Every structure is written in C-alpha cells, then in structure tokens.
Amino acid sequence: MYREYSDNPTGDRLTYSNDAVLVRPVRHSDLAIEAEFFNDLSFERKRNRFLGGVYSVSNDEIEQLCDLDYHDSMAYIALFDNGQFPTELGMARYVKDIENNAHEMAIALADGADIQFIGTKLLTHLFDYARKNGVKRLFSIEFRDNTEMKSLAEGMGMSRKIDPADIHQVIYTIDL
C-alpha cells in the first residue's frame, strides 16, 4: 500500500512533511501508484474529480491518465516518500480540448492532504509548464458545491462562471 495514514486524533489527515513533497511529471511507469491513488480516493473525491458517481477507475482510464505527449497533455504528481514507500498526495493534469480550442485541466488530491499547499504546488507546476509550451488558457469544469476547488481556484487567480450547460457546475478559467 502506498498511503500511510496518521493515527493522530485529527482523523484522516495524511502525515507528511511539507518541505519533503516532490512534484514531478507523471511517468508511464506510475501505472500502479496511480491505480492505487485513484481507487483509494473517497467517493466524494472521485465524484469531484470525474464529475459523477465513480466507484473505481478502470485500468484503461489509468493508462490514459499516464499516457502523455508532454505538449497537448501533461500531468504532475505530488509524492512524499517516507523511506519505505511513496505516498501520492495528488495529481494535476491538462489535455487539449479540440472542441473548445483550449486545454482542460483537472486535479485530484488525496483524502487528508493539505488542499491549499499540495493543490497550489501542483497547479503552479502545471501552469508554468503549460505557459512554456504555448498553452494560452486552461479551464476546469467542477461541481458548484466543490468548495475546496473554489478556494484553490480563487487562490490561483482563476475566474469563475456558471456552466451554461449545467447550473450545478462552474467553469474555472485561467489565461496564461
């Protein structure tokens, strides 16, 4: 198992040192850690990441998440290695959306991870990489009740509007 949960009284907080969090590009060799990361997420985290009731993530979906061209698609993961096994704290990625002539991004954070610290760290890497590769705009479609994403997006300077196709969703956008 890749995750180590704290036995402290705060419950499900992950134990890790913020200064020892490594953010790096996703590799195809990350298939196993990604499968465990996504399948271990709570129902709520999966719901927010995949915009619906997902109970598990298939091997084909994990393969797609790790299959990047490093230009029109890119992903970063945040890892903490306690010396025994790595703990994945989150993943942020973007992929080209041909329909909208833009790049859609998504982020998933481990249950118990520090949303602001890990989320900001991942998105900063993703935004910098996208900018260097000529991506002009990133957008993310989220549920309106996803308050963690709202806080993270506001902190990253993203704009917010109600999704015209679904009033239960919002679209966050950032021009790079």
Image (spheres, grey):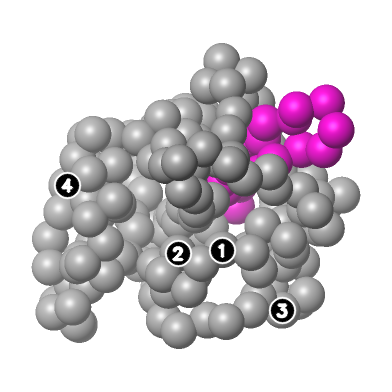
Q: Residue at x 28, y 34 (%)?
A: 156
- Amino acid type, mark 2: Arg
Please give left or right for residue 13 compared with residue 64 in the image.
left
- The disc placed on residue 45 is 2
Residue range of the region highlighted in magenta in the rendering: 73-92
Element on which disc 2 rests: helix
Marks 1 and 3, the one that precedes in the sequence:
1
**Looking at the image, is 52 positioned above or below residue 12?**
below
Q: Residues within 10 Å of mark 1 (few under 14, many from 20)?
A: some
The Cα atoms of the two marked residues, 2 and 1, are separated by: 6 Å
80 shown above or below 13: above
The residue nearer to you, when weighing 97 against 155, is 155
Residue that label 3 marks: 58
Image quadrant of residue 170? bottom left
Pointer 4 residue: 159
Q: Amino acid at mark 3?
A: Ser
Residue under label 1, please give it. 41
